[in-house]
Amino acid sequence: MLKIINLSAAYGSIPALQDVSLHVPAGQIVALIGANGAGKTTLMRTITGLQSPQTGKIIFRNREIQHLATPEIMRRGLALCPEGRRIFPNLTVQENLILGGYYSPDRRLRRDLAEIYQLFPRLAERQQQRAGTLSGGEQQMLALGRALMSRPHMLLLDEPSLGLAPLLVQEVFKTLARINRRGTTILLVEQNAAAALKLAHYGYVLETGRLSFEGPSHDLLHHPKVRSAYLGE
Amino acid sequence: MTWAGFAQQLINGISLGSLYALVAIGYTMVYGILRLINFAHGDFLMVAAYLGIFGLAMFSLPWPVAFLAALAITGLLGALLERGAYRPLRRAPRLSLLISAIGASFLLENLALVFLGGRPLPFPTPAVFAGSFQVAGLYIPRLSLLIPGITLILLAALFVLVSHTRTGMALRALAHDWEATALLGINVNRLISLTFILGSILAGVGGLLWAMKYPQVNPFLGVLPGLKAFIAAVLGGIGNLAGAVVGGLVLGILEVLLVAWFPAWSGYRDAFAFVLLIIVLLASPTGLLGESIMEDKL
Ligand SMILES: Nc1ncnc2c1ncn2[C@@H]1O[C@H](COP(=O)(O)OP(=O)(O)O)[C@@H](O)[C@H]1O
Ligand SMILES: [Mg+2]
């Protein structure tokens, strides 16, 4: 589904990603874990065309996308729940969701809205409320729902658990598992390594712009170095 | 001043203020989305006025055809301006964009000067827009009713577009967060083109109405109304659609009343706009309704 080959990116002369290669097979959940400042968000921004890479290739659904503009990349079936959620606070919950399905015909849009409201009943109750008035957890649900409205082949998530209470984190991760079971491939970026690796099939560890470990998430969970560095043991 | 005199001036003020409002909308929409003061915006009044003359006088078109053609071309030129002068600079510093806008303004004015000459051309106002009538001792030019009427209809249409359509939602989203909008796959460039087309068409309507109100068209026709409309936009709170309307009306009405009440000061009527702006900004730095970047609909 997504293949990244020898990708490097920088802010001015300061490198942020160096020679990163990773693979997300169709149907899977892949976790990318790393400490604050490791370059996780930079990777998400580079995949989605918000930043251009210095070198390397990004292949999504068998096409190179690293030279495309963001809207074109996303319209190929990619969606991102960005860091900090980035919902539109002055639009209503419903308007936020509609924008997620901006190019859907009316009938499909209505059906998809109903589906999202079923997945997140809390959003249904707040349809006409301004999104800025939602709680942090509800805003995360909205960001997730908005991303799903385009029926993406693949969903990227940048720290969906950030700032959420543990109970809510569990709820979000359960929802991700459900979304995946329905056929959406997921690349999940997290500092919360334990939760992310428990959910994922495969994991990568990013350290100051370079990948240091990778493997089936079960193996990573039991890897002594990963345990000491990311699982607080 | 008598009651009748006051009413007379109020009508004049509303009519002038409506024109400022029409033009101010374009400044505020572009600012809301690009954070750019489009200094070439006022020149689109001039462009539309000349196009109106060509259609009416040179090609002898019926006025609805001539006006619609003038507006369509003006809208297209607005989109072209963005394509040529602003889009290439999207990742450049704000200041480059501003300089490009000032350059585009000089270019438009001087092209008109070279090709159309500096001598003012008379605007052949169609009969529907000419004439006046008297009510209760008031002398009311037909234009003084048509201008606010047309403005009201156009602003209502814009309101419906911005607050009740998918496109309008996307415009509001874009004004708030460019990247998040692009991440939804929404064609941001098309929305920006649309913003310029809409703003230029409204300025074009303003230009045609202005040319019928003051039927002498020269290459610098748009400079002063453009400047006043810009002041109106800042006065109301730049980025705020309702603010542009309020700012335009307040400026137009006060300007007319100032001249009526203090005829000796009429030479200062253009300076007055700036004085008003400074006073309002000292009291409320984000304008009368506050800077709100198209968030509060209209
Ligand atoms: N806009 C920016 N300008 C300069 N440096 C940046 C910028 N954004 C991030 N960085 C730097 O790039 C590195 C990676 O940041 P980021 O991708 O945000 O990491 P993460 O998401 O893993 O916390 C950090 O050292 C950070 O300071
Ligand atoms: Mg980050």
Image (cartoon, grey):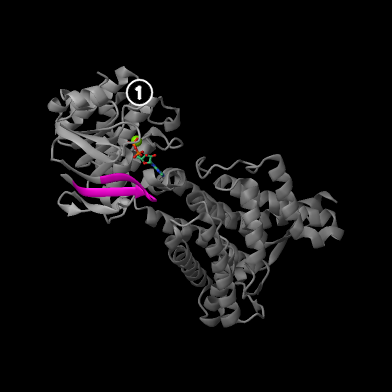
Judge from the rendering whether residue B246 lies leftward or rightward of residue B139; answer left or right: left
Residue A178 seen in this snapshot: yes
Q: Quadrant of residue B263?
A: bottom right
Q: Secondary structure at mark 1?
A: loop
Dominant SS in magenta: strand
Question: Who is closer to the viewer here, A16 or B92?
Answer: A16
Query: Could you tell me which residue is drawn at 62 percent across and 42 percent down?
Result: B286
Q: Quadrant of residue B172?
A: top left
Image quarter for ligand 2: top left
- In the image, residue B26 lies at what x, y percent? 54, 56
Judge from the rendering whether residue A145 lies leftward or rightward of residue A3; answer left or right: right
Query: Could you tell me which residue is drawn at 62 percent across and 74 percent down?
Result: B219
Crowding near the residue tagged with mark 1, few <14, some 14–19, many ≥20 C-alpha atoms within 10 Å: some
The correct choice, above or below, for A206 with respect to B63 in the image is: above
- In the image, residue A18 lies at what x, y percent? 27, 46
- In the image, residue B243 lies at what x, y percent? 60, 46
Residue A9 belongs to magenta span: yes
The residue where tag 1 is placed is A164
Question: Who is closer to the viewer here, B74 or A196?
Answer: A196
Query: Could you tell me which residue is drawn at 31 percent across and 18 percent down?
Result: A166
Residue B8 seen in this snapshot: no
Highlighted range, magenta: A4-18
Residue A42 belongs to magenta span: no
Could you tell me which chain the residue with mark 1 belongs to? Answer: A
Quadrant that contains the C terminus of chain A = top left
Quadrant that contains the N terminus of chain A = top left
Total marks shown come to: 1
Judge from the rendering whether residue B28 lies leftward or rightward of residue B249; answer left or right: left
- Label 1 sits on what residue type? Leu
Query: Could you tell me which residue is drawn at 30 percent across and 47 percent down?
Result: A46
